[in-house]
Image (tube, rainbow, N blue to C red):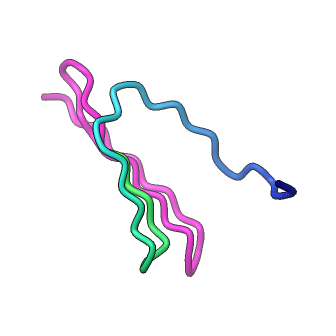
Amino acid sequence: MGGELLLDIFREGATRLALISAAMHISVDFHMGESAGALEIQVTPAFCVGDRLLFQ
């Protein structure tokens, strides 16, 4: 592929990966011991990344 790498993330403990094509949206839920969270990536209309981490 000839594209430029925009994002490279390693997330240990991922439990769910969802690709939502209508919104060009990727969601990754994760759980590791005493912490849990979600990584949200939106491709259009603008590239946007949100990352939440919660301690239980």
Seen from the viewer's position, the closer of residues 42 and 1 is 1
Q: Which segment is the magenta one?
A: 29-56
Above-or-below relation of 42 to 2: below
Is residue 3 highlighted in magenta?
A: no
Residue lying farthest to the front in this orientation: 1
Q: Position of residue 42 (x, y in %)?
A: 49, 66
Percent x, y for residue 54? 22, 36
Quarter of the image with the C terminus is top left
Residue at the (75%, 49%) spot, across then down: 5
Magenta region's main secondary structure? Answer: strand
- Is residue 41 left or right of 3 when viewed as pictured? left
Residue found farthest to the left: 56
**Which image quarter is the N terminus in?**
bottom right
Instruction: Please tell me which residue is depicted at 56% across the width and 77% down the height of the picture.
Output: 44
Instruction: Specify the farthest residue to the right.
Output: 2
Between 52 and 19, the one lying in front of the other is: 19
Residue 33 location in percent, x, y? 21, 18
Q: In percent of the image, x 81 and y 58: which residue is there?
A: 3
Whether residue 44 appears in magenta in the rendering, the answer is yes
Residue 14 vertical position relative to residue 44 in the rendered view, above or below: above
Q: Residue at x 37, y 48 (%)?
A: 17
